[in-house]
Amino acid sequence: MTLAANPAARATSSPSTLPVLVAGGGIGGLAAALALVRQGYEVLVLEQAAELGEIGAGIQLGPNAFAAFDALGVGPQARARAVYTDCMVMHDAVDASLVGRIETGEAFRARFGNPYAVIHRADVHLSLLEGAQASGRVAFHTATRVERIEQDAAAGTVTAIDQHGRRWTGQALIGADGVKSVVRQQYVGDPHRVTGHVVYRAVVDKADFPADLQWNAASLWAGPKCHLVHYPLRGGEQYNVVVTFHSRETEEWGVREGSKAEVESYFQGICAQARQLIELPRSWRRWATADKDPIENWTFGRVTLLGDAAHPTTQYMAQGACMAMEDAVTFGQALRACGHDWPAALALYQKNRVARTGRIVLSSREMGRIYHATGVERLIRNQMWKDRPQPRFYDALEWLYGWRLDNCLQQG
């Protein structure tokens, strides 16, 4: 469904009858739309791509992600598309020794109330999109890039101006336009931090995947200034393969086609079992990664940020999509708790998300250091989790995986 820009029609509407604008139709934008629908709003999603969809490959879903799916009303759809792992496991990529193993079976589910799983990113997007479409209250306008925002404080309205000069007016705007957010650039304008770490991602059919690596696990091989990840997707018929390394080049933030020769050049010192992974893909997509320092304020009048636009992070905590969905649920609950008073709700939403998402950004940087340790740091890493009982792992993860609908909003 699309909704044409019609300034004249909007001019005669009261602010409360206008839709809420969402800039971005990715995972964060669709989650925001669903959260708004569940609070009784009409939503207009403005997406710059010609079609709604997701690029990328697999992502990991902690129990907090499933709590968010349920709160957004799409739990059954997401659960049906996920692959449920037996464990998360880390090996040393040099000598193949076991570094740590976290069981994600019955004891894990009993502790956190939800499973751990892996899923294709497109399947997360599809689950959210189906929910939005089924609601009948979310309109989409594609090939529409928001380039500038205006606010009328007296009228209580926000207007997004797109690349064609068209004006889209709503009662508020959610900037869910990703890591290179135009909304954030207008209101914050802070620089990004290029990590120098390059990520290659690919999906490999099961028939082509080594039998000795076909584990039902989220698996990581930690190497010197590099690591490799693999796990099953889509009922085990495919495997996600991710390799990350410290680039020798001066990197610029972006995505392009990759080169097998480049990947091979960074993984000469790893064990044969892990090295099989880089021989598999026929094609690679190459991401030069970046993040931004956490900010204390991401709300500006009736405009707020959500997901990667609010807290762009590196991939090492596997929480980017999870945090976007948490944002959306918390935002919806803040609207309800504040009686749909937009300024109060946006302030409450931000208050409940800044520290948690900032912890993800900073923890992700530290996990990157741990994964890529060399020398004595590598030896220390390999002893950190040796013989640790499973309850101690679960205790350490409580802050992350213990998030739920009933505890997402603290008003004190």
Image (cartoon, rainbow, N blue to C red):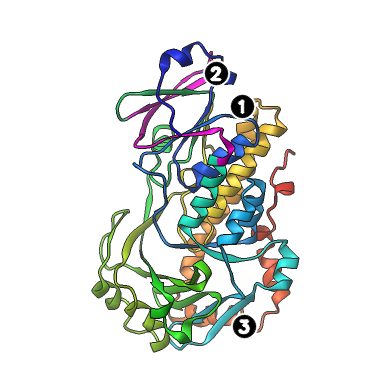
Q: Quadrant of residue 181?
A: top left
Question: Callout 1: 10 Å neighbours few (<14), some, many (20+)?
Answer: some
| Callout in the foreground (3, 1) | 1
Identify the element where label 2 is drawn: loop
Q: Position of residue 99 (x, y in %)?
A: 55, 81
Q: Position of residue 264 (x, y in %)?
A: 29, 78
Residue at 58% x, 82% y: name it: 383
Residue at 43% x, 41% y: name it: 177
Q: Is residue 382 left or right of residue 143?
A: right
Is the C terminus in the top left, top right, bottom left or bottom right quadrant? top right
Query: Label 2, on which residue?
Result: 156
Real-space CA distance between mark 2 and mark 1, rounded to the nearest whole angstrom: 9 Å
Residue 386 numbered mark, or none: 3
Query: Label 1, on which residue?
Result: 342
Indicate the amino acid at tag 2.
Answer: Gly
Is residue 210 depicted above or below 360 in this figure? below
